[in-house]
Amino acid sequence: MTSSDALYHIGFGRGDLGPQPPVLAFLSGDPGRARYIAERYLTGVKKLSENRGLNSYLGLLPNGRPALSATSGMGAPSLSIVVNELVQVGMRAIIRIGTCGSIQSHVEPGSIVITSAALCRQGAANDIAPIEYPAAADPFLTVALAEAAHTLGVEHHVGITASVDTFYEGQERTGSANPYLLRALRGITEEYRQLNVLNYEMESGTLLKMGSVYGFAAGCVCGVIAQRTEGEAVLLEAKATAVENAIRVAVEAAMRFA
Ligand code: URA
């Protein structure tokens, strides 16, 4: 049973968050990952909602502080709705835990990328701030993520992420239902590689702009599951390690972040 102040999409409200409400949320694209984080890394877990695949759970971090594990869904439009509502229910820090494709040979599958800023090619973000507005992660949260990775011995890279709206065309994949790429997208991966962009993913740009505009701390850590300097495929054999690394680092960073 949810409280009467439940927000329309996330399916819960402030009234569901108890006497010690959390101010930090982990945000995964995949509802299964949101549930896994809650079950594996939080204690005293309460299911808040499983509405529209936007699963949300409340629990305690290993240091006893409360946290949410929520789902953004895939892509920036869905994320923008969830983040808006999470801020309405009191979140002051949001850490995206995602997956990504590397566009640098030294950023290997299984490792993680901590986004310091995003090259934001996302339509949803343009409804929130001008296209030129920086998509910068909260610097203190980013340091907490990098220190957590260092402490845990997780291979990590901190830098610029290309955050785009599509998995196929926008990330220059031609082995899909649409082999035709717009001229503007042909060669874009190599161009980004030359610009020292580390990886492709699909949500951080909008999240980071929202953090600066709304006034909450936004961060992003992604496990590397594709090596785009070599091919287009998702490397399923790297996924479990990459995702677990990203989650461990996010949880450790959350405990360090005041
Ligand atoms: N997520 C992406 O957006 N791209 C990839 O290549 C892998 C995961």
Image: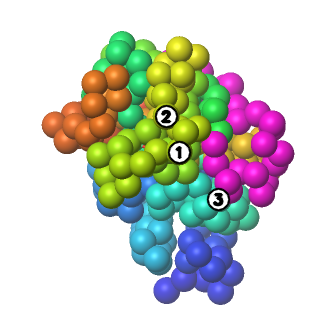
User: Looking at the picture, does residue 58 appear above or below residue 166?
Assistant: below
Q: Does the rendering let one see residue 212?
A: yes
Q: Which amino acid is tagged 1?
A: Leu
**Going from the N terminus, do you reach mark 3 or mark 2 first?**
3
Seen at 59% across and 55% down, the residue is 76
Between the residue at mark 1 and the residue at mark 2, the CA separation in whole angstroms equals 7 Å
**Label 3 CB less than 8 angstroms from ligand 1:** no
Read off the residue under disc 2: 186
Query: Picture coordinates of residue 239 (x, y %)?
Result: 25, 39
Read off the residue under disc 3: 80
Read off the residue under disc 1: 182
Seen at 19% across and 41% down, the residue is 236
Between the residue at mark 3 and the residue at mark 2, the CA separation in whole angstroms equals 28 Å
**Going from the N terminus, do you reach mark 3 or mark 1 first?**
3
Q: Which amino acid is tagged 3?
A: Ser
Seen at 58% across and 24% down, the residue is 160
Q: Quarter holding the C terminus?
A: top right
**Which quadrant would residue 173 be assigned to in this image?**
top left
> Magenta residues?
121-148
